[in-house]
Amino acid sequence: MSRLLRALLGALSLTLAWPALAIAPPAIVLARDYQDGQDVSRYLVSEKLDGVRAIWDGQTLRFRSGREIHAPAWFTAALPKQPLDGELWLGRGRFAELSGLVRRDQPDEAGWRQVRYMIFELPEASGNFSERVAAMTALLAQAGVPWLAQIRQFSVVDRKSLLRELDLVVQGGGEGLVLHRADAPYLTGRSEVLLKMKPQHDDEAVVVAHLPGKGRYAGQLGALRVRRADGREFSLGTGLSDAQRRDPPPLGVTVTYRFRELTAGGLPRFASFWRVRED
């Protein structure tokens, strides 16, 4: 074997063995559940959109996992160079349709014409949240992009007013509310700066096992065994469609589940599968 051929084969084997570089998830603000007794007058309130979280770093649009969203070139070319955080949204009750659209490697041009990028934060921007809301308004007005919009922020005086707003959103087919401390600087991670308020609680867990079904579900998925961020495991056996029981979410994927409350031991009570997290 010639020296040149050996060198080429060595370079090829090194290339094949080299691990793919993982993209680190962006540091973003995450919400905690609203608890009774919190002073809601200190927060700005908005509707919690049933969309797909999207982070724009000034050049690339990404899921919260860091994976690139393959939006059409015209969609991202007109976005400001300043980082943005928000939700890709088609409208209330259209999450499944949206999820299928934004996961495609080759963007559906006609489908994306219906998508709006609803902004609720300016990552790493200075000032408190009220000031950043004003900056968002000015930035979006300057951009003049029809598919770029701002989630409406408003104030409430007390919990009674907050519950009234929640009822209006839910009756209209919305998911719930988000509360953001008006005086807070830009912070990442999960804290009391950002709260979510919904008729039901929800959280995320990673699928670690597929449990076999019995009776009518014999030969199919009976339940998902999932692990929370704190390492505790439990099973999700309700909320799954027949199609998901035949072709269950793969191991390692993150799913969102809903529940009414926590048990005395800290596990979700009446937990049910909601959907695979889009990332």
Image (cartoon, rainbow, N blue to C red):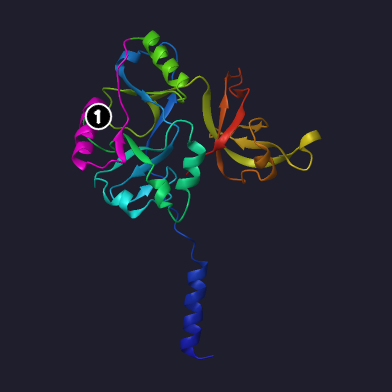
Q: Is residue 84 left or right of residue 14?
A: left
Q: Residue at x 47, y 19 (%)?
A: 171
- Label 1 is placed on what type of residue? Val
Q: Residue at x 21, y 42 (%)?
A: 143
- Is 202 colored magenta in this rendering? no
- Is 154 colored magenta in this rendering? yes
Q: Residue at x 78, y 43 (%)?
A: 219
- Residue 278 is at least partly visible in this image: no
User: Horizontal and vertical percent for residue 196?
Assistant: 43, 24
Label 1 element class: helix
- Please state which of residues 273 and 151 is positioned toward the viewer in this rendering: 151
Q: Which residue is mark 1?
A: 133
Q: Residue at x 24, y 34 (%)?
A: 136
User: Horizontal and vertical percent for residue 217?
Assistant: 76, 37
As drawn, 177 above or below 8: above
User: Horizontal and vertical percent for residue 267?
Assistant: 60, 24
Q: Is residue 116 left or right of residue 171?
A: left
- The magenta span reads 129-157
User: Horizontal and vertical percent for residue 75?
Assistant: 32, 49
User: Looking at the rendering, which quadrant does residue 174 occupy?
Assistant: top left
- Residue 152 is at least partly visible in this image: yes
**So how many labels did they put on this image?**
1
As drawn, 161 above or below 194: above
